[in-house]
Amino acid sequence: MKKSIDDFALENITVTMDDDGITTVTLNRPTKRNALNAETIEELIEVFSNLPRMGARAIVLRAEGDHFCAGLDLVEHHVEDRRPEEFMHVCLRWHEAFNKMEYGGVPIIAALKGAVVGGGLELASSAHIRVADQSTYFALPEGQRGLFTGGGATIRVADLVGKSRMIDMMLTGRIYAKDEAIDVGLAQYLVEDSEAKAYEIARAAAENPPLSNFAICSAISHMQNMSALDAAYAEAVVAGVVNTQPASRARLAAFADKTAARVKPKS
Ligand code: 1HE
């Protein structure tokens, strides 16, 4: 049976959806700076596994409190005193959650503020678009904590900033903020109000046909994992389906009869 938002049983996250399918996922553990404990990861899996089939057209991922996310729950990790294989299984659950986001086919826009560090940056880098404000800062303090990334940073953060910058961040604890964070690719927007901008982007993206958004928010990521030859083939197959969809007919007709907007910078 199709889930509704009321069916979610969540302790650390809240979810709301408006009539247009604009969905808000809120990290709601501000007293712990939204640190990711095992329970929160399970809730992210539950939410992001189901939202794409519940009518979500675009998702804003935001946080309560002053900080987006302080990463791995270090206190839980300390108390649990995990064995290697136990933590490997923890990491597999993180990957499950973040893969559901990146490959889920629905645009996710992260509205960032304060600390976006360690696993918090892994979470943010699983969104499709990152919006920073003046308070936002990014770091990978794993080296200082005697840890290593386990939630996909070696793939997604390296993808954003490149291998050398990621190694520098992990070895030295270097913090990126403001324009410098934008310049190295950690976020695509730097604004006064990251939530307002994230909703503006979400509403714009939700205007696209869902099939186009599905392809944009899953196919590009999948194709990055393929050989160039296979990616080109997959691209042709996806474009064959997307570019012939009924939803594009009216848009193409509007271009042909000159009623559609042209692609020009605002003067
Ligand atoms: C936490 C966590 C956490 C805060 N795990 N409980 N991540 C880090 O190394 C970042 C660790 N956190 C911090 O550096 C700071 O907390 C912040 C800069 C984010 C915020 O500072 P502040 O002064 O506002 O808060 P605080 O006093 O440090 O913390 C407030 C509470 O949040 C406090 O709990 P309380 O019960 O004593 O009130 C903190 O213990 C709690 N808290 N951050 C658990 N991370 C898959 S591998 C990924 C590996 C990593 O992510 S490594 C990076 C870990």
Image (tube, grey):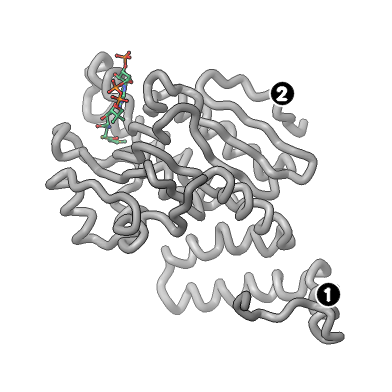
Amino acid carrying label 2: it is: Asp
Query: Can you tell which quarter of the image residue 53 is in?
Result: top right
- Percent from the top left, x then y, of residue 70? 34, 32
Q: Which residue shows up at 14% across the image and 33% down it?
A: 146
Horizontal placement of 110 versus 121: left or right? right
Per the image, the residue denoted by label 2 is 6
Q: Quadrant of the C terminus?
A: bottom right
Element under disc 2:
helix
Q: Which residue shows up at 34% across the image and 52% down it?
A: 178
**Residue 84 visible in the current orientation:** yes
Q: Residue furthest front?
A: 267
- Percent from the top left, x then y, of residue 46? 57, 31
* 247 over 205 or under it: above or below: below
The residue at label 2 has a CB less than 8 Å from ligand 1: no
The residue closer to the viewer here, 91 or 121, is 121
* 191 over 185 or under it: above or below: above
Q: Which residue shows up at 27% across the image and 62% down it?
A: 162
Density class for disc 2 (Cα within 10 Å; few <14, some 14-19, many ≥20) is: few
Query: Can you tell which quarter of the image residue 160 is in?
Result: bottom left
Horizontal placement of 216 versus 240: left or right? left
Figure quadrant, ligand 1 = top left
Amino acid carrying label 1: it is: Arg
**Residue 159 visible in the current orientation:** no
In whole angstroms, how far apart are the C-alphas of marks 2 and 1? 36 Å
Element under disc 1:
helix
The residue closer to the viewer here, 31 or 43, is 31
Q: Which residue shows up at 25% across the image and 14% down it?
A: 79
Per the image, the residue denoted by label 1 is 249
